[in-house]
Every structure is written in structure tokens, then in C-alpha cells.
Image (cartoon, helix red, strand yellow):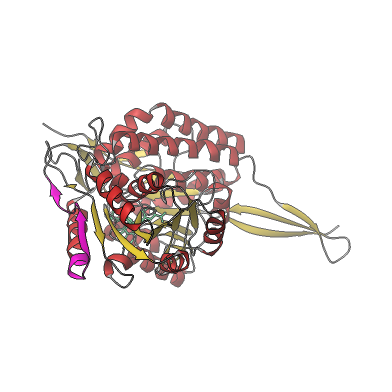
Amino acid sequence: MTTQKFDNLINGQWIAGASYTPNINPSNLADVIGDYAQADAAQLDSAVKAAQTAFPAWSTGNIQARADALDKIGTEVLARREELGTLLAREEGKTRPEGIGEVTRAGNIFKFFAGECLRLTGEIVPSVRSGISVEITREPMGVIGLITPWNFPIAIPAWKTAPALAYGNCVVLKPADLVPGCAWALAEIISRSGIPAGVFNLVMGRGSVIGDPLVNHPGIDAISFTGSQGVGNRIAQQCALKLKKVQLEMGGKNPQVILDDADLAQAVELSVQSAFFSTGQRCTASSRLIVTDGIYPRFLDAMKQRMAGLKIGDALAAGIDIGPVSSKAQLEQDLSYVQIGQAEGAVLVAGGQRLQCSTDGFYMAPALLTDTTAAMRINREEVFGPVASVIRVKGYEEALAEANNTPFGLSAGIATTSLKYATHFKRHSQAGMVMVNLPTAGVDYHVPFGGRKGSSYGSREQGRYAQEFFTTVKTAYIGS
Ligand code: NAP
């Protein structure tokens, strides 16, 4: 049986790839979703040039038309949420309800930024010189390169593309090579939205082949990247050399603190959700459960019991809690970190092994490691899978110190019934996002998203704060 071919979108045209790569369902390796184009450097160059050509008209064009187009995209994404959520579950391995949730988020983001097209404001301030006034306005940056990871195949392309377009920029999107299907579907919707040719371009392919030239292309004015710290670090250096604006959202080693006074059932539920749902493949997943002495034995027993009831299986099957790991390489990494933890002295109390399900896929039983210390690799390096470790501490002060004892700083959670500790934690956690009695993962789409330390670099994404990256400030002096 021949599989369908999916091409790149360059200057409003569907352009055949230099080659194609199969998109394979991690729940069922026999299921090929389609063959997706691999762009080469020449096609990337065409996409950047198309965006440059489209920029003058788009950046100064009618903002009602811009808002209408973004609204139309959001409407179609929302209307097709079940179909696109199924595609997402099929290519990435989130469960179908999680996939539908992510697509809903993507649609809502386009709706939100449709409104933002009409809400950009400036300032008029008096000059210190008489007879002169000063206008401070925001203008689009130009052509933006967007590079996205595999773990949110539609939400992250949406949360970069929507503000980029809303503020008048043109875009070249390079999605993760592992999951091009949702980005292609989004591009196809954008191509019919009324947005002129060249304003939005999709180039699919490997980061090493077209990601690198995209970052370094002289026609690219700014790069918004989400992915690993290693790649982000390299991109930051390349952008610095070329004096390009850059925004990086990277990994996490997010702590979930459980205090003695926590509601036990709530603490267990939010820990299981944060650590293992979406197969632990969320930058905001909590991989370090920091538990105080008084609740430790009860928490551990309840966690083991809850984990024993988790249903792992085909992402498209009904009633599944956790789908497969997204790729063979990621599964091998997850399993190897379980071994690394044990070799360092951690005790594996649940899961941690590969599972066989009814279809051949990358299934893994969520792993819980106890007796871990902050110095262990398992507590310092991002695993990016269903692997959590427990750190036992004496009380709140030690818990806070452990929570902050990490090179990352994306999200941090605390489970407590104490207003005093919740308030103190909110203020003193060294993370960009803090959750009180909520999972560390799961955020709203209309407020800023991002972290500190090794998790983020540059200005925040999402909500109104996105305008900081996608616009540049102009100060105009008007004499009489
Ligand atoms: P990755 O390996 O860093 O890849 C991210 C993107 O960069 C992919 O599109 C990749 O292309 C591309 N890329 C690779 N090498 C490149 C290069 N030399 N130049 C330019 N682009 C290049 O990350 P991932 O494995 O896809 O995603 C997982 C990571 O993303 C985790 O660390 C996770 O924490 C992080 N993440 C962070 C956030 C956040 O908002 N903080 C959100 C989600 C995920 P290929 O696909 O071809 O490799």
C-alpha cells in the first residue's frame, strides 16, 4: 500500500521534498501515517526569500484582515479538534483525550492572538524639549525562524506562529522531524485562511540539515526555539555571533514538594499527573518529588497503589492513562536513566521496564525511584520520560532548598494546606511558574509561559508578553 506524501509549503505552493521520511505511530510501529517531505538548503532559502518578499505588505497591511485570518484558523482548528487530536495521538503517543486537549489549546491560541492584532498600543509622552512630542510604538521584527520540538506537535507551532503573524511578522516554521503531521495540518489550514503567499512557510526536515541553515540564514531576523538545552545553547551562540534576537524555551527538572500537611489524595494525584501523564514528556513534568518525613511512608504507599492502577497502552484506545514513549531513542534514554539511578544507589520501587502491549510500540511502565539525593544524575539531568525520583527531606526549609537545587527553573509545585508555606514557596521558588496544589504541568494559554536559569533564555512566550519578542520598539520625535 502506498502512503500519502506531504509536501513543504513555500510561497503559498506545495513543494515536493528533496526526499521523504515516514512518520511512524509509536503505539503501533506497523502504522505509517504518511511520508513527509525533507527540505534541503535550497528550499529553505526559497522559503526565507518568500517571507522577505511578503513582509513589506503584510507588516503594514490591514489589521482587521490579519485578525480575521487568525480567527478563521482558530475556528477551523477547534472545529477539527477530534480529528487533529487523533492525528496527534497517532504520531506523538499522547492519549487521544490529551491530543484533543492540545489541539483545543492551539485553536484557542489563534483566537486569542486574533484579538491581539487589534490591541497593540503605544505611548505618547512629552519631550523634555518644548514643542516636541515623543511617540513610542512597536513594530514587527521581520522574518522569524520558528524551531519546535516533538512533544507538543501542534501547540508549540501554534503558540509561536500566532503571535508572530499577529504582530506583523513573516514566518518560516521548522517542526520536529519526528512529528511533522500536526504542523503540516496546521500549515494546510493556514494556507486557506486568506493569509498571503509567503507570509507563512513550512519547511520540514532534520535540524542538522535545515535547522542550522535556518538559524544562520542572513534573511532571518529572529529565532524562537523550543527544545533541548544542548541545541538551544548552540543556537544562542550562533544568534549572538550574528546579533539576531533569540528566544529559547528548554528543559526542566521540575520539583513537586509534598509537605506533611498536604491532602494526601490530592498530593498523590497531582504527582502522578505531573510526573507520568503525557508519558512524562512535558518540559513542565515533575521528575523530582520532594517529600517531608511526616507524610513520606503514607505518600509512598499511596503512590505505589495509584501507579499499579495506571493503564498504559495504545494512545488511540479508550480508557488509557498513558500512551507510549514517542521514539525508540527516547525509550532507550528513559530505560537507561532508570539504570543510571539504580547504579547511583536509588531504589526502584515501581515500574521502569519496557512493556509489551497488543500492538508493537514503545511502551514503558512509569518508574519511581526512592532513596535519591540531589547530587545524583537522576536528579540533575532531564530524562524526559515517565521516570520520577523521590527525595526525602526533614521539613519545609530543606524542601525549598532541594527544589531550588537544580540548574533548571521552569515550573515548581507545592502540595500543602498551609497558607504560610504556600505563600513563602511562591515567592522563593526559583522557577518561572509556580503551582500550589496543582500539577507542575498544565498551564493557561493566555498568560506568560517560561522559566529561569537553564530552562529559558530571552523574553517570555504566550499571552500579551509574547509581543516583547515578536516586536521591536521605535521611538519617534515629532517637532512642530
Ligand atoms: P531538540 O532535540 O533540541 O530539538 C528541538 C528542535 O530543534 C527540533 O525541531 C530539532 O530538529 C531542531 N534542531 C536539532 N538540531 C538543530 C540544530 N543544530 N540547529 C537548529 N535546530 C536544530 O529537542 P526535542 O528532543 O525535540 O524536544 C525535547 C526537549 O524540548 C526537552 O528538553 C524539553 O524539555 C524541551 N521542551 C521545552 C519546552 C519549554 O517551553 N520550555 C516545551 C517543550 C519541550 P529535529 O527534529 O530534526 O531533531
Whole-percent x and y of residue 394? 40, 67
From this viewpoint, which residue is outermost toward the right?
130
Res 212 quadrant in image? bottom left
From this viewpoint, which residue is outermost toward the top?
79
Is 407 placed above or below 291 here? Answer: below
Whole-percent x and y of residue 477? 77, 60
- Residue 33, visible in the rendered structure: yes
Residue 351 relative to residue 377: left or right: left
Residue at x 30% of width, y 50% of height: 280
Residue 353 relative to residue 229: left or right: left
Most foreground residue, 293 or 71? 293
Ligand 1 position by quadrant: bottom left
Res 476 quadrant in image? bottom right
Residue 460 relative to residue 258: left or right: right
Q: Is residue 348 magenta?
A: yes
Whole-percent x and y of residue 464? 58, 48
- Residue 39, visible in the rendered structure: no
Residue at x 30% of width, y 48% of height: 302
Q: Is residue 233 magenta?
A: no
Where does the C terminus fall, quadrant-wise? bottom right
Boundaries of the magenta span = 340-355
